[in-house]
Amino acid sequence: MRHLSIDILRTAAIFMMVVVHFVENLSATYETQASGGHPLNPWWLPAGLAAPLFTLLTGVSYAIWLGVQQRRGVADAAISRRTVRRGLFLLGLGVTFNVLVWLPEDTFNWDVLTLIGTAMLMLAMVRHVPLPVPVGIGLAAMFVAPVLRSIADYPAYWQNYHFDYDFTLSDVTLGFLAVGYFPVCPWLLYPLVGFVVGRTVFRDPTSSAATHTVGSRTLLMLGGLLLSAAAVASLLSLLQTTVTSESWRPPGWTMFPPSPSYLLGTLAAGFLLLGSLHALVDMPTPPAASSRPRVVLPPRITAYFNRISRHSLSIYLLHHVVHIWPLWVYGVATAGEPTAHWQSFMPAWAAAILALAFYAVCGPLFAWLDERGFPTAESVMRWVCDEG
Amino acid sequence: MNADSTVAPLATPMLPEGVPAGSRIELLPSADGGSHALLLVPAGTGESLDVVEAARCWVAESVAADSRGPIAFPVLLRLYNVELAWSPTRSAAIAVEERFATIRDAVVDFTNLEAELHGIETGIAEAWPNYEADLSFAYGFTEATLGQRERLLGRYAQVMSLHGRLARLTRRITQPAPQPPTLAGQIGERLRERLRVEERDEAADGELEVLCGHYDACGQRASDYTIARRENMLSWTIIILLVIETLLFAADLLASAGT
């Protein structure tokens, strides 16, 4: 059972991720962003939504997948096995990806793939417990994160806006828990909350139009409340500091580490987008045409969102390979050091154009791969994890 | 006359042809808000078969929609020089004028009793498909089926209400007839026999036992699950707090080990 709203949002999330990574790896630096001098700064704020949206949708999709498995009568043990296998597969893929793309010194930088793998393992644990429990775990991860960062001395691990660690048990573990790029505290909040959203709003595909309306309205209402909470968190951080040089950025709005206003704001944005799209493109319009959504997109557009969403993992892997590996090769060839041209290879606008070009190619490329039945990251994952 | 529904009062029916002058129709109010039409025909020196047949046909006109299983309507009685034809919505009595009041009271009393019993039977018949659909809930609940509690509560209340109504009705059914025998008492007794009221009461009681037992078990399972869920939540709260404590401890340990 596919929901167009989720496909659209995942397409948007992977689009933002592609653009952010192309621009930030080929041209921009966190330093120039933080100083407010980057020409893209006013436009760069939504870029911080990509990872939260991606991880939130992971939870929603898992809940829907779980519902489908249960309706098909798949045994509970088989569901657990598949979930754990998928989690371990993504964890392994994340580490392998780090070695191959970010080079061995960044093996344990704890990127988004390892977070999603960990989240899958966590979801396998909490899928039977009452829904307040995953929310409680997510909130606990959010509230304990600043304390963990304080204990671990977070600034000591972040040199020049990048996670810099030693290959020691303490650094690797602390990176996983609190100080890496996407540590479980607080990033587990998104998939866990997404799982609860999936179980409540997208629970039953045969539910009535009224149930869909209630689900959408609840999401919109919660999104509004979270947005208010994010605004309050921003105001509180504004009161605490007199440094507000980055006028375009809400006070206290940082992704690394994720500040309370960032967490609440991105969660609010996720809820508002999901609620709106669910109401518009998923929800049947009562009472006259109960089987039609309010906005009907052309089949080709729907198929495009569907394809990009289904292949989001492959696109995530591929877009790194196509822009990072040539950069490393060029670095070795010209300066003897793979990372010599990292973040200084081309202007931001040129990187953005490259990102758009890559994204434009993705649709036809994956249509062609699907047509010929070539394996993709998703099909390999299903083959490894879902068979047997 | 289903006691569960409000029945619109009947318009006074026309007198049937062939009944003697002085005959009249009375609309008797029933407990469910409807009415029961009673045709009272004053008896002469000897009733012709035509008059009895006319009265019977008049009563039979109304019974098409009524059913009590194998019982055929109208039910015909003859006792103490009274000819009585009874159906759930119409009755006809041929008797001397002085006995009309007694007959009227007896018909009202029995009609209300029978209507109440029929209402309970209808309620039971409607509850059986739900019983079949709810069988799994007597075994246990899951997180996904917990939302069915309100619906089950409604059905439990409905079945218990039927059981309560039947218990009150049973007392009326089983109370002894007045002694020495009276016309009203005998009409009631004979009609109860002919409509198998006591057997139907026992059968309804048996069915309601099963339904009540089932929904009682559902309630017990729902309650068990809710309590277990609450305890589960408490356990998870403790687990989360312990995990947080362990995380903080581990982070502290690792941070100090790192330095």
Image (tube, coloured by chain):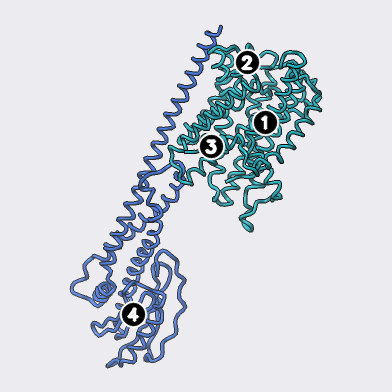
Under mark 3, the amino acid is Trp
User: Which label is found at residue A105?
Assistant: 2
The quadrant holding residue A358 is top right
Image coordinates of residue A1 in percent, x first then y, are 57, 46
Q: Residues within 10 Å of mark 1 (few under 14, many from 20)?
A: some
Tag 1 subunit: A
Q: Say what secondary structure mark 1 lies in.
A: helix
Q: Which chain is blue?
A: B
| Image position of B254 with respect to A345: above or below | above
User: Which label is found at residue A383?
Assistant: 3
Q: Nearer the viewer, mark 1 or mark 4?
A: 1
Under mark 4, the amino acid is Pro
**Label 1 belongs to which residue?**
A318
Looking at the image, which residue sits at the far top? B259
User: Which label is found at residue B74?
Assistant: 4
Residue at image point 55% right, 26% down: A91
The answer for how far apart the CA atoms under marks 4 and 2 are is: 97 Å
Under mark 2, the amino acid is Glu
Q: Colour of chain A?
A: cyan
Tag 4 subunit: B
The quadrant holding residue A339 is top right
Image coordinates of residue A253 in percent, x first then y, are 69, 24
| For the residues bearing labels 4 and 3, Cβ distance under 8 angstroms | no
